[in-house]
Image: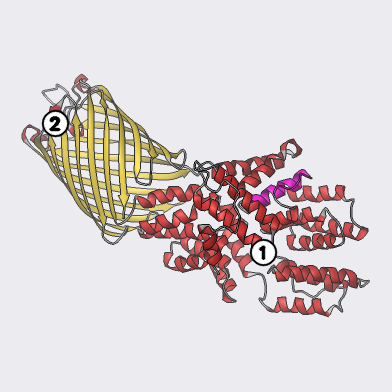
Amino acid sequence: MIAPLLAALTLAVASEPCAPVEPLPQPDPASAALYREVGDSEQAAGHREPALAAYRDALRNDPSDTKARAALDRLCRAPAGADPFQEGLRRMQAGQPREAIAQFEQARAGGPDPSAALLEGICWYNLGDDDAAAPLLREAELRPEHREMASYYRGLVALREGSASDAARLFDVASADPALEHLSAGLARVAHRDGRLVLSIVAESGWDSNVSLAPGGTFGPTSASDGTYGLSATALYRILGPSGPYLRASGFLHDQFQLGTYDLKGVDGAVGWQVGRADRGALAEYDLGYRTFGMNPFLTSHQLLGSGWLGAGGVVWTASWLGRFESYDGGFSPFSGFLQHGELRATFPLGDRALAGLAYGLGHDSTERSVLDFTEHGPGALLRLGVTPRLRFGLDAALTFREYGAFDPTLSARRADQYLDGAVFTEYDLSNHLMARVALTGRKAFSNVDAFDYAKLVPTVGLAWIGGW
Amino acid sequence: MIAAALSLALSMSLSAGGAGAGEHLLAGAGLFREARYAEALVEFRVAQRLGAAEAAGYAGATLVQLGRPDEALEAFGGPDAPARDALLDYYRGLAAFDARLYLAADRALTSLGSRAGPRIAGQAARLRQEIATALSGEPPRTAVDWYLARCAEYRGQQREVLARAFCRESSELGARRADRYGAQPRSASEPASQAKLAGSRP
């Protein structure tokens, strides 16, 4: 919808408007006067090209029309050559933002030109130079006809700078234009949920067809089903905005209604540093985690995470690695060791409303016993679809091939598993901060050991509150 | 292709105005076909001054191409002017769309019905789909106020065709709200938050 709005600024450029005029064989002063009237009218309305064409026609019909001659000379003296605004627009539409910027600057050199300021600001935004874009967009915003578009781009700049409250206010202004309302309203909600400080609380309940014996896939299921409920809270503080150091704290509980010995609780504290933006960047993070299982100490972990991403050709490539030193308690202690997982992911838009991703992961767990060590790898895929501005749909799928490190005498086998994981969910924004979510996750595990061959389904419903400042 | 169709339609429909007006209309049509819109507009404006009533519609189509939708709507006699040639009615809808008069644009494009050829009908359908997407949610109060402010602005400039169009759009958008804010026709001079804002800007 933005492209037609920009295209509406288009004006045709007459070719050679100031070249010498070839007079007609027979002068026609009456026609010349009509053309001159049209020229005067167009010039008075600020439309240079039609005025030039009209004065040229006037002189073609009557070379002695001094008023037309004077008006044409005045117009031709003002800016030499092609209209820089038009040339800038042409360059912008041809995907040459830097060349377009030079033209818009020339157009603004003669005095305030909010249209040129708007388009130049958009060019700078697209080039990632928000400092250059911001004052131009502010200038354009002063004109009522550009107010919403300029606010929309100022909102994008604010969002990119991490000024979520400013972004939310600007998107609210931009949404006054119905053509921008869909884009702006969605981004306003994003802005209301973003900022230097972000708090989120999620409550959910559901049913597990096959409750796991222990978290993390270290054991198979119980073959017993139960209802579940969970609560989690996260606080993220980005000290300098999106780029820079950050702190994160989170806690969760995931309980069964009846099988209380499988209840899981945990807390995490993390410190990290992110550089760059959505199209390119990297982060490094340390996370200290603690878990209880059935009210007993279960796991203490020290996790390192590194990730980098780069946008190229419409695809964002992400490479990430995590390494976790795991220390299990009590009877789980043989699982202690060092778990690593790496992934390469490509995400790309599918049309205006969908995002798809393809990934391949590789992991290895070194434990205290070689029979528990495993190496796993496999592909994954995701799809995110914005059904309406408030309603989203998501789909995740993954296939994992896992092989254990040694023959296990207890199982009389060297265990090898394959996992087919899937999740579908839909989210609906009830307000700028509140979101409802319905999800269905499932796993089918295939194993060369029958006891680890199982399937499970977990439908859940939940409410999430997210606020950013 | 649509520009060529406009030129052909004009060539076949020349009837009114003097011989001089006809020449300017044809010259304008030729320039329009060559996408020399500034020069085409001049020819259509001269034809208007020579009494060719149909020149206004062609000037309107040209103004759409020049990115001057508000003036185009004035040339057409407003977004809800009586239907004439299907091609010009399509341009009238396009002018309304470019002027952000989405409901008016939808009415104009709907009125094309079976009169439009397949190419224009296809373009009109795509435009109507964009309009449906833009208007699928409840219009915000700020949008209702924005149209009312534009109405007041045009009324102040004594551009009554545009003032009526923006006031009607404001009222009809209001009628799409659950609280019907702005649904009742209001005087454009009535204080409204957005009108005050717009009025205070340089």
Q: Is residue A104 left or right of residue A216?
A: right
The residue drawn where x is 23% and y is 38% is A231
Q: Which mark is residue B157?
A: 1
Q: Quadrant of the C terminus of chain B?
A: bottom right
**Image position of B51 with respect to A102: above or below:** above
What's under tag 2, amino acid-wise?
Answer: Val
| Magenta stretch, residue numbers | B80-96
Residue B52 visible from this viewpoint:
yes
Q: Is residue A129 left or right of residue A437?
A: right
- Name the magenta segment's main secondary structure: helix
What's under tag 1, amino acid-wise?
Answer: Gln
Q: Position of residue A450 (x, y in %)?
A: 21, 19
The residue drawn where x is 81% and y is 71% is A36
**Image position of A169 with respect to A230: above or below:** below
**Which residue carries the number 2 mark?**
A371
Instruction: Identify the element where label 1 is drawn.
Output: loop
* Quarter assignment of residue A396: top left
